[in-house]
Image: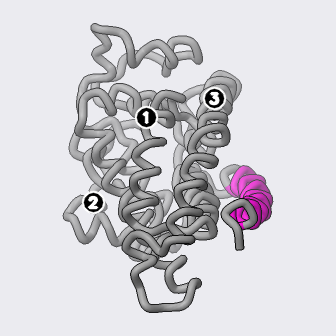
């Protein structure tokens, strides 16, 4: 199979998974109103345009840069059996599964870096500045945050041996997971779910306006990484959603775009 056909087949798979993801978002919207975890502090109409606006710009970066560039690397990886997953003496589906798990492992460490490297945190803080949290918070990322991660993703795909299929499956799975664990949901089985996946209750702690809580629960898919690297916490501080020291309402769209580049931005100081 040529690289072009491989990439095309992977994109068709990704489109199908995306459709399932959009259906899932509709179910999340309904479930948030039926089983809410938190009482909103701000009007949804004040937050929604900001989160959707930031999300539209971020997803544009993903569509125009990350997917095509990382997809080309993935096609070369599969064709040449390059990288860790492709070294496995196993069928393609096993190598794809390994690629998905390895990407999840890499995403955990990238998330940790966005909190601990000052430049990366200034961009990532836009995500944490939301003073409420629901599935739309999963879209609230600065476009520069996404752009700076593109070459990182390309290197991950090459070194980890991620095929085009594994890349598309992980992309859809990642979006579904991130929308789910940002949702304003109180589930009776949340604590049990957190033993395997990042649950809404687990990620609720990560978004609390408390430095110790923000420095915990970095996993975006499988929760095993937090337990493995000692960053798991089930201690929920009695503070609201947001950034420690944050004053006033969450920034509007234009302010959110400009804030990472403000030289005296206290809200972007490392937690």
Is disc 2 in contact with disc 1, using a CB cutoff of under 8 Å?
A: no
Please state which of residues 45 and 8 is positioned toward the viewer in this rendering: 8
Q: Is residue 243 magenta?
A: no
Q: How does the figure colour the protein chain or chains?
A: one colour
Q: CA distance from mark 2 to mark 1?
A: 28 Å
Q: CA distance from mark 2 to mark 3?
A: 32 Å
Decide: is 127 above or below 154: above
Query: Mark 1 sits on what residue?
Result: 148
Q: Earlier in the sequence, mark 2 or mark 3?
A: 3
Could you tell me which residue is drawn at 66 percent across and 63 percent down?
Answer: 3
Query: Mark 3 sits on what residue?
Result: 57
What is the quadrant of residue 74 in the picture? bottom right
Residue 191 x, y percent position in the rendering: 42, 71
- The quarter of the rendered structure image containing the C terminus is top left
Which numbered dot is residue 160? none
- The quarter of the rendered structure image containing the N terminus is bottom right
Q: Secondary structure at mark 1?
A: helix
Decide: is 44 above or below 20: above
Q: Earlier in the sequence, mark 2 or mark 1?
A: 1
Residue 115 x, y percent position in the rendering: 29, 39
What is the quadrant of residue 12 in the picture? bottom right
Label 3 CA crowd tier, 10 Å (few <14, some 14–19, many 20+) = some
Span of residues in magenta: 6-31
Q: Earlier in the sequence, mark 1 or mark 3?
A: 3
Residue 264 x, y percent position in the rendering: 28, 8
Query: Mark 2 sits on what residue?
Result: 233
Residue 96 in view, yes or no: yes
């Amino acid at each position: 199979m040529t690289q072009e056909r491989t990439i095309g087949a992977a994109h068709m798979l990704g489109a199908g998974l995306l459709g399932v993801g959009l259906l899932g978002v509709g179910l999340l919207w309904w479930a948030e109103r039926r089983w809410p975890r938190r009482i909103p502090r701000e009007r949804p109409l004040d937050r929604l345009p900001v989160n959707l606006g930031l999300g539209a710009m971020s997803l544009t970066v993903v569509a125009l840069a990350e997917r095509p560039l990382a997809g080309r690397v993935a096609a070369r990886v599969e064709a040449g059996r390059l990288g860790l997953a492709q070294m496995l003496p196993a069928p393609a589906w096993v190598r794809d599964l390994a690629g998905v798990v390895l990407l999840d492992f890499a995403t955990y460490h990238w998330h940790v870096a966005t909190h601990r490297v000052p430049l990366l945190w200034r961009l990532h803080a836009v995500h944490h500045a939301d003073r409420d949290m629901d599935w739309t918070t999963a879209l609230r990322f600065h476009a520069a945050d996404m752009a700076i991660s593109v070459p990182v993703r390309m290197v991950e795909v090459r070194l980890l041996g991620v095929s085009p299929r594994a890349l598309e499956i992980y992309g859809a799975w990642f979006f579904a997971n991130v929308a789910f664990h940002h949702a304003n949901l109180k589930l009776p089985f949340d604590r049990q779910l957190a033993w395997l996946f990042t649950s809404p209750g687990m990620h609720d702690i990560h978004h609390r306006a408390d430095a110790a809580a923000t420095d915990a629960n970095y996993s975006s898919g499988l929760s095993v990484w937090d337990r493995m690297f000692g960053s798991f916490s089930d201690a929920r501080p009695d503070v609201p959603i947001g950034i420690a020291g944050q004053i006033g309402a969450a920034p509007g769209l234009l302010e959110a775009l400009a804030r990472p580049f403000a030289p005296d931005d206290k809200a972007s100081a490392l937690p």
